[in-house]
Amino acid sequence: MRLGEMVVDVAPLRSSRNFRLVFATQTISMVGTHLTSVAASIQVYALTGSSVQVGLMSLVLGLALLVGLIAGGLLADRVDRRRIVLVTRAATAVVIAGLAVNAALPEPRVWFVFLAAVLAGGVNGLGAPALMAATPHLVQPGQVAAAGALTTLTAQLGAMAGPSLAGLLAAGPGVAICFAIDAAVYVVGLALLAPLPALPPDGSHGAQRPLHAMAEGLRFVRGNPVVGGLLLIDVCAMVFAMPYALFPELGTEHFGSGPSTVGLLYTAPAVGAFLGALSSGWTGRVHHTGRALIGAVALWGLAVTCFGLSPDLWLALLFLALAGLGDTASEILRRALLQHHTPDRLQGRVGSLWLAQATAGPSVGNLEAGLVARALGSSAGAAVVGGVVCLAGVAAVALAVPGLRRATLQGPPGASEPTAAKASPAAD
């Protein structure tokens, strides 16, 4: 493969005006989302003086997002997806604007921040599966992986720029400005997305009851070796080898430094992920996509293992960057395979399961890492154990699910749909 083919593929931006609109919206939205996330944490701590309250707000937000994602998956397979995206973005803009008004009051109310976290998390969860399900219709069939890589690139840009900008604004004009900017970003996003065409789901399951509709999505995941396998292999990485909860102790105790070192540990994976997104052109051209996915997840596990064994900070940062690169490649390939092998009428429900796993998996993984570190009395040892277990899990999935090893982005979309999932059960 030539060097030029390694660079992120921008073909979807050149060939699709509609995808350009979505890409521009996601780019500014990711920066705005991190502005609000960091500003809300700063504000809650300033009002309560409690890190527990900050953690509780994050938990409330995560739970609301999880519920919204499940409901949003059902909705995205019933209703025009463009309408869902526009309505949820408008509602979120109102919630964020409320945060700005609350922050500007002489005595801001902390209960309103928690309420806004519930509302924003739930509404964003409702809209996310619709936008994910709509994306394959905005690009050419062979550009699904490239579109996923560009989407990942916007997320990494937001993760790098948003928190730093939020800190500067919070220290200067105040957190109200952060919220106001994010609300304005949502309004701009509405204007950008308004020209999109109607995006109705193919073969609506409107005659089904919600529980039956979700059960159909679960049956599809269980019966499809590619989709089920890629969700299973992601569990190996996110649950068994998630090292982020270990960074504070490693930065202060293992490497003998302070908060600045902890910040470097958190930054290193994001830098690697950004570089991975920039060099993702190969993801849409590799023929053995399933094998490449298995290799990318194995790279994450190996890098986390080596990180735990690193005696020096510079070496630890290098392995964390390598882990971020593997994680980005894995995410791009998983998204592309999921969208390629899922029929359109199930895109919302299956996509919501993937997004829900991506939301809950790291939280469970960080808790597991903390518990292992306590049991071993060593955060570095917990990282090593997690990486080794991840590698063992990847090997087990690769051997047990041959369909995942053979998976490819070649052929018609939805070609691997199992027979059992093709017939929608009638409503009772």
Image (cartoon, grey):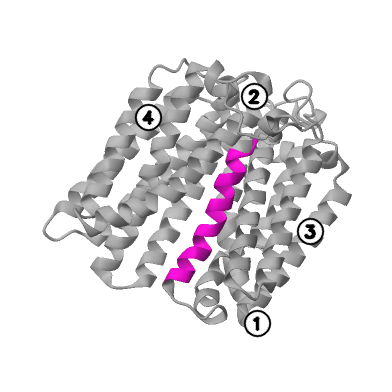
Q: Is residue 263 magenta?
A: yes
Q: Disc 3 or 1, which lies upstream in sequence? A: 1
Mark 2 near mark 1, Cβ–Cβ under 8 Å?
Answer: no
- The question of residue 175 being in magenta is answered with no
Left or right placement of residue 120 versus residue 154 in this view: left
Q: Residues under labels 3 and 2: Cα distance?
A: 30 Å
Dot 2 amino acid type: Gln
Mark 2 / mark 1, whichever is N-terminal: 2
Estimate the spatial distance between the alpha carbons at disc 3 and disc 1, rounded to whole Å.
21 Å
SS label for mark 1? helix
- Taking the image as shown, residue 362 lies to the left or right of residue 299, namely left
Q: Nearer the viewer, mark 2 or mark 1?
A: 2
- Image height of 349 relative to 141, above or below: below
For image coordinates 39% across by 36% down, the residue present is: 28
Q: Which residue is mark 2?
A: 143
Percent coordinates x, y for residue 249 in the rendering:
52, 77
Which of labels 4 and 1 is toward the front?
1
- Identified by mark 3, the residue type is Gly
Rate crowding at label 3 as few (under 14), some (14 to 19) or many (20 or more) other CA atoms within 10 Å.
many
Single out the residue that lies furthest toward the bottom: 377
Q: Which residue is mark 3?
A: 393
- Check disc 2: other Cα within 10 Å, few if <14, some if 14-19, many if 20+: many
- Residue designated by label 4: 87
Quarter location, residue 224: top right
Q: Nearer the viewer, residue 333 or 348?
A: 333
Disc 1 target residue? 375
Judge whether 355 appears above or below 386 on screen.
Answer: above
- Residue 176 in sight from this viewpoint: yes
Q: Secondary structure at mark 4?
A: helix
Q: Is residue 403 left or right of residue 319?
A: right
